[in-house]
Image: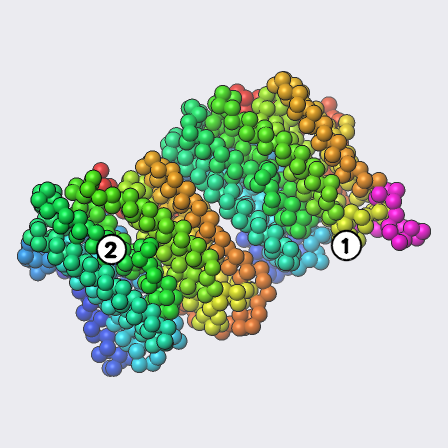
Amino acid sequence: MSAAAHLPALTVVVPLFFAYLMPLLARWRKSWCAATTLAVLAFTFFSSLYLANRVMSSGPFVYHMGGWAPPWGIEFYVDYLAVFTALTISGIGLPVIVYGIKDLPHELKEGVLGWYYTLYLLLMASMLGMALTNDLFNLFVFVEICAIASCAIISIKESRECVEAAFKYLVLSAVGSGCLLLAIALIYMVTGHLNFTFLAATLPGVMAVYPKNILAALALLMVGLGVKAALFPLHVWLPDAHSSAPSPSSAVLSGLVIKIYAVAMIKLLYKVFPATFAGMAPVMAMLLWMSTLAIIIGSMFAIVQEDIKKMLAYSSIAQIGYVFLGVGLASHNALLGGILHIFNHAMMKAMLFLAAGAFIYATGVRKLSQLKGIGVTMPVPAGAFAIGAMAMVGIPVTNGFWSKWYLALGALDAGKPLFAAVVLVSSLLNGIYYLPIIVNAFFSKPEGAVAKPGRLPAVMTGTLVVLGAGCIIFGIFPSLVLGLVSRATRLLLGL
Amino acid sequence: MEVKTSFLPVWVVMFPMLMTFVIYYVEQHSEKMRNALSVATAVVTFLSVVALYPEIVAGNIIEYRMFQLLPNLEISFRVDILSFSLAVLSSFVWMLVAVYSVDYMCKEHGCNRYYPVLIITLASCMGIFMAGDLFTLFVFFEAMSLISYVLVVHEETVDALKAGYKYLIMTIIGGLALFFGIIITFEVAGTVSLSGPTLFGEPTALGFFAFISFLIGFGMKAGMFPLHVWLPDAHPVAPSPASALLSGIMLKTGAYGLLRVIFHVFGIELMRESGWTLILAVIAVITILLGSAVAITQEDLKRRLAYSSIGQMGYILLGMAILTERALIGNIFHIFSHAFMKSTLFLAAGAIILKTGKRNIKDLGGIGRQMPFTMFAFTLAALAMIGIPPFNGFLSKWTLALGAMDAGVPFYVIILLVSSLLNGLYYLPIIIAAFFGAEHGHEHEPIKVNEAPYKMLIPIAILAVSCLLFGLLPTNLPFDLSRVAADFLLRGGF
């Protein structure tokens, strides 16, 4: 077999391998760390692109780890959703770390820089693994890697609030992992399988015999993944964690990490459980209401925030609600909108966090009220922030518009216009907290530190420009991603 | 009548859009070039719109499909007689305002922001009028609304920012309502194109939601009660040329949107049988009376003009609510009339503010002797507002009243009369004081004539004379356009 055939495994293994190499490299050739990380991420991006191309042309395929077929071996299932997620992860992860090359030495202590790259690659590898895997226990392993890496990447700044936030996250995330493990045990106990495909085949039969077992497992899965995805009301750890982390970490955590759990939940709900739980538990209705609350309450909390990164973190809680809203509505357009929003939100939230990071880098100011006039002195980051904010509100010709479009359309398809209204109300709330920032940024006199910002490295500015352009390009040509997303949705819904 | 494909509508929209970047580039080097280019862009845009005239007057419709975003969702342009009427009106007023701006803005700060925004708003405005489907219309509508925020807060004072914030939030609400309406339409009809038959077949609950959403979205822009709250704050704080555009032209995009919704999305039969026009009628009557009544209590000249705009937009809404042929003619003609009158008034107010710094009506005594030319133009437009023959305001009210009689509702005629009376109550004192009063404390001093520069006076003069001419001339181009447009809409609009 050629190397290309092993790409599904390599996409995960290569970053994993280099993650462990990184501390060594940091001792030996410090300057190589960043370049190596970039190369690895570029590799994952291009291999995801290759996989996407292959899936689009010849359909989904499976890959068996080490040639061992399930039920013994681990199986990767490369389908539309998997490659879409992999592309999102590597496509956003790459610019974020490019930005980080300049930002991280500024935020972190000298000695831990090498470790940061380790953690970053671990995080990437585990997320890519979660996207591709077709095995429940393998999923759990990646979830654990991801959780530990996320905790470490928050606490790496070693400030008091970071450690506190990371500890909070660690505890809650451990509870989530415990729930997941229990759920897996319960499922394995009654079915004897861990592979998604086998589970989907055996669960309907088992359901009749052990309904309570399965329902308990389902509940535990929902809670476990819900905590990690910060689905309201399990979100309490998120605002502290995401706002105190270094900016590239925040961008990845808010943009990608919480989404990957949503992807895991989509996989489980649509591929493993669909036939069995219908009628037994109103899972979708629960998801709908939880996401509605997330959307409304997350936005409301965001309105009252004073700290720019905290506001963005609360906004993430609302935005993850959009994804779950799409999942809960379960109509083609809605699910499409939800999945699309994974990508769109990853792009805009990463950009917003990086823009906020740029403000902090150059001025040291985090308070929204002190960021007046920042658009005059730092036009590029403030411009990127403005584009991101417009995308959040869902102004046409930004990518956020299309998520809203499909979600609202999907809500109407499902015969629930109320939830279309929820999407709109939340856009209004987004407007209420994002627009004053832009207005103050561009139409006020800069004062204090904002008036004389430090120079922003070209790499950081460039990243913001690229992401900003991305928001616009995917807003004008939504069909670039929609082909993939629409096929993913069709496959999931069995259309 | 046939449908033709032409690139011209795209050109009309794209040209000012591209010129915005050119202007942005040029203004880094030369202010003179910037001003000249801005004016030239507005003139070329106007001429390009005029170039559509032969096709339109032959009864043809011009279409151009730009590109497809998604299945059944595209950026397309379509110019019929109604689009043309409004586009030609807007680009004409825009051109005059651009000329006026050159001298008015020369002492202002932030001109490098003002001109590009002025031109790109023109582009989006043209986009609204020439949109071939609701989605394109929505995109340009949002663009215009959001970008004109920069015009509203131009002064950057606390008041301006506060008014701007209100404006922004209302714009977002309006945009979302519009989005909701469009998405329901798309869901029900599978398309949002304005070139086919009407999109809704029968009055369903969902259709009603859509109607209300459209009403909120476009009505917000048109200053409809109770969504008018942003207007009296936002219009006065903007620089006067921008106020003239905001009040004279941009309000009309809301009215235009509603016309499209009534005739293309729902269709006139559905509107009549569902009785939804009654909602519009009630709102229109309240808007008329409220706008006119509150205008009386305003002390600030520009604020009074802004409230007057609300009242006048009520007439336009009323025309849509009555929906007889003559009411519709009156409705469309009043779009023309009000654009001419209100732009004259705001530009004249701007000239006064520039020369004397006076905004308060109490201080305007004797201003007519100091600035006779400006105040004469103001008087013409104000008389037109009141609806005194032979001004254009009279003609539109007359036609509207006839339309109301056709519909058998003399009540509306009474409303029109009452509102005219109210208009008289708040416009005449200004004029009387201006010409026959004297400045407080300076009763015996001789007043020197001190007019604004001629580049400001000429646009004012052209607009003021238009108010007279388009009520007087036997071949009245706006009136003819309105008549053909009303006929076209009533025949189904495609």
Disc sitting over residue B334 in the figure: none
Disc sitting over residue B357 in the figure: 1
Count of numbered marks = 2
Which class describes the residues within 10 Å of circle 2: few (<14), some (14-19), or many (20+)?
Answer: many
One can see residue B23 in this view: no
Dot in front, 1 or 2 = 2
Q: Which residue is mark 2?
A: A223
Residue placed furthest toward the front: A212
Query: Which span is picked out in magenta?
Result: B433-453
What residue is shown at x 87% (from left), y 51% (from top)? B440
User: At label 2, which amino acid type do we have?
Assistant: Val
What residue is shown at x 48% (from left), y 39% (from top)? B178
- Image quarter for residue B281? top right
Residue A238 position within the rendered picture, expressed as x and y whole percent measured from the top left: 34, 62
Badge 2 sits on which subunit?
A
Q: Is residue B198 left or right of residue B227?
A: left
Badge 1 sits on which subunit?
B
Q: Quadrant of the N terminus of chain A?
A: bottom left
User: At label 1, which amino acid type do we have?
Assistant: Gly
Q: Nearer the viewer, residue B258 or B229?
A: B229
Q: Is residue B358 left or right of residue A194?
A: right
- In terms of secondary structure, where does tag 1 sit? loop
Residue B386 position within the rendered picture, expressed as x and y whole percent measured from the top left: 75, 32
Q: Main secondary structure of the magenta part?
A: loop
Q: Is residue B427 left or right of residue A251?
A: right
Q: Is residue B380 left or right of residue A425?
A: right
